[in-house]
Amino acid sequence: MIRRGFITAALLALTLARAPAFATEITFYYPIAVGGPITKIVDRYAEEFHKSHPDITVKPVYTGSYQDSIVKAMTAAKAGNAPDVAVLLSTDMFTLIDNELIVPWDDTASAGEDKAWLKAFYPAFMENSQTGGHTWGIPFQRSTIVQYWNKDAFKAAGLDPDKAPGTWDEVVAFGRKLVKRDGGGQVTQWGIEIPSSGFPYWLFQALTTQNGAILASREGTKVAYDDPKVIAAAQFFADLGQKDGVMPKGIIDWGTTPNDFFALKTAIIWTTTGNLTNVRSNAKFSFGVAPMPSRVRGGSPTGGGNIYLFRGTDKAKQAAAVEFARFLTTPDLAADWGIATGYVATRPDAWDTAAMKKYVAGFPAAAVARDQLKEAVAELSTHDNQRVTKALNDALQAVLTGAKPPKPALDAAQAEATRILARYQH
Amino acid sequence: MNLNSSAERPSPDALRASPSPRRGEGTRLNPHVQGWLLALPAVALLATFTHVPAVKTIIDSFFATPRGNHAAPFVGLDQYRAMLADPIFARALENNVIYALITVPLAIAIALAMALVVNACVTGRAALRLAFFTPTILPMVAAANIWLFFYTPDYGLINQAIRALGFAGVNFLGDPATALPALMAVTVWKEAGFFMIFFLAALQQVPPDLHEAARLENASRWQVFCRITWPMVMPTTLFVAINALINAFRVVDQVIAMTGGDPNNATTLLLFYIYQVAFSFWDSGYAAALSTVLLVVLASIALAQFFLLDRRIHYR
């Protein structure tokens, strides 16, 4: 009896003594931007990580939308209570650097195998993750824009149901055939919908990429809003609604675009690959997923969120954060996350896992976004990003609503962006 | 209204004369100290959450936005000069003034009309009152989402009705000409029911002998309204108007929930723009200057109520 008591006491003393010395707790902020039981999946990842790394506990904190999440991370950091790791938009990189809130991964992850890890991702995703010779973001929930088309509507319009528009000319030609009107001349089905609410620059960037323009310099200090190729892309975007009559006029809401597709109000939509699972479960017709059409080239901007490492004084926490980020981006987990959400698995070897091979065999559309990555470019991102981007958003909405022609609108946006970025020119 | 007027404040003499069974003469507090202690919780709360932040905001508006861990340099009136050259600020202010000038009178007129209806002896009066009041009970974000569905192009409720009548559909929130009016409609719908309650209370305070006298004189309904009802509810109208005006400059939820300022700032209102500058652009110095302007607008409305209009209105 005494002996047992002694052992218990000794064990207790041991646990008490060991607990503070070995347990590292890190806070992980993450947003949700797609449907599905995301919090459950993230909690499961955190538990699995704790099982394989008993000395580290991850505390996942769901922080709302991307915008809510950056507000929470920035205000918490300014109050001296920053998270250790967070998933935020890849385009927030310059903002986070300028506010001195994050540190590069390569400072902590400097061992040989860490270096290999930082090179394991698709180069298209790293474009938004590196600047000044450092890696600031680890690709996690990344996407591109793809076309979804209604095969039944194509058949009814006399088009090949297995061929999505492959060029700008086909977008217009197919669109004209797909538009349906009722007896009174009202359109009951549009050819195409490219959303333009909230962040029209992202979908517009697909058009500028296809027309051969690059919107921002890699250092994030210059933009090319007044490039003639960009102006021509804006003209094409506006003409779809105002001249060709294949797209609704005015601003098309991002959120209702998939619903318009399900309700047969439009035969083609452009939206994120992150909507793949949503479309798959809600479309009551056979649909296809295709890469973006091309003009002088194909291509789409990437999108979505990276994992950032926040500035802190505790080396143990930073090392733990690197361990956790590596765990979240192993080929198996990247595949699992991609299948569960519709995001593009971020590294080539994730597509060689058994789970992913099985998924793609049953649902080939899932691989479209991956195959498009070789033509993908960095999403528009600069210093003072949201303000510089808003200049373009405002110009685009002015053009799409017919308030201004493309050239003066984009010239004004360029002037505004140049003014904002002046302080970052060296 | 004047809860802290001198007439209601206990005079020092009264306090001194009051019996104090538990305390001896020597330990009695100075009445001024006692008064301040009583007010302390309210003063502390107001100071912490209203006055100190307001003063700090005004001070911050004379500094640049701090970058990283560096202190912000003093820039004097630069933020205000930038504001004068900022087309989005001009647009937000213009939108907000239009928004106030249209929603406030409209909400008041509809509220008064509804109050007159539910004050009269009609069958189903209780049900009508409830129906008119329901929008007020709904949270703004829920109401905004309902209206988002109403406004949806093609298959939204309003567009279905328009199309059934043979007219072309309208992209309410996607067209700069209709986006702001669409938001105004939500506000009027939401606020009119709430203001109706105040008018209903005011109507029930109108002495019945006035109506009896009018009936003896064979006055028309319009004359009764112009000569009796309208003057008698005037204090309520003023109260409601001031509140509606202040609310009109504090609107932010339906902008965030419905348009995010789209298209091309057509629905950007002042407070939403402040939010955007502060939490999307992280330009806290400029946001402080914008907040100061909003503070001045709200303070002027309140002062107008207290000092100018208050004296011209007939209170019984």
Image (spheres, rainbow, N blue to C red):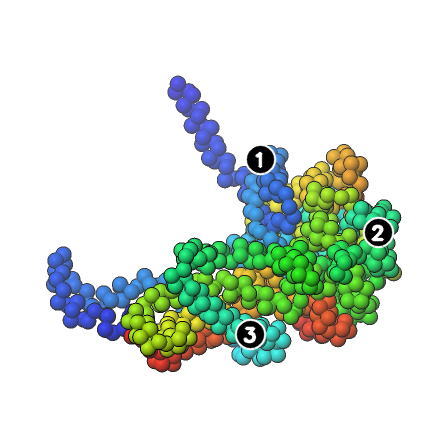
Secondary structure, mark 2, is: loop
Name the quarter where the C terminus of chain A is drawn.
bottom right
Give amino acid for label 1.
Pro
Write down the residue under mark 3.
Answer: B98
Q: Residue A215 falls in which quadrant of the image?
A: bottom right
Tell me if label 2 and label 1 are in contact, CB under 8 Å.
no
Q: Nearer the viewer, mark 3 or mark 2?
A: 2
Query: Would you say A408 lies left or right of A57 here?
Result: right
Q: Chain of mark 3?
A: B
> Marks 2 and 1: same chain?
yes
Name the quarter where the N terminus of chain A is drawn.
top left
Residue at the location (76% across, 58% down)?
A183
Report x, y in % for residue B24.
Answer: 12, 60
Give amino acid for label 2.
Ala
Closer to us: B247 or B65: B247
Report x, y in % for residue B59.
Answer: 48, 73
Q: CA distance from mark 2 to mark 1?
A: 60 Å
Closer to us: B5 or A56: B5
Vertically, is A184 above or below A322? Answer: below
Query: Would you say B240 lies left or right of A129 here?
Result: left
Q: Nearer the viewer, mark 1 or mark 3?
A: 3
Write down the residue under mark 1.
Answer: A54
Q: CA distance from mark 1 to mark 3?
A: 61 Å
Give amino acid for label 3.
Ile
Query: Would you say B45 lies left or right of A371 here?
Result: left
Tag on residue A157?
Answer: 2
Closer to us: B72 or B226: B226
Secondary structure, mark 1, is: loop
Q: Nearer the viewer, mark 2 or mark 1?
A: 2
Q: Residue furthest top?
A: A1
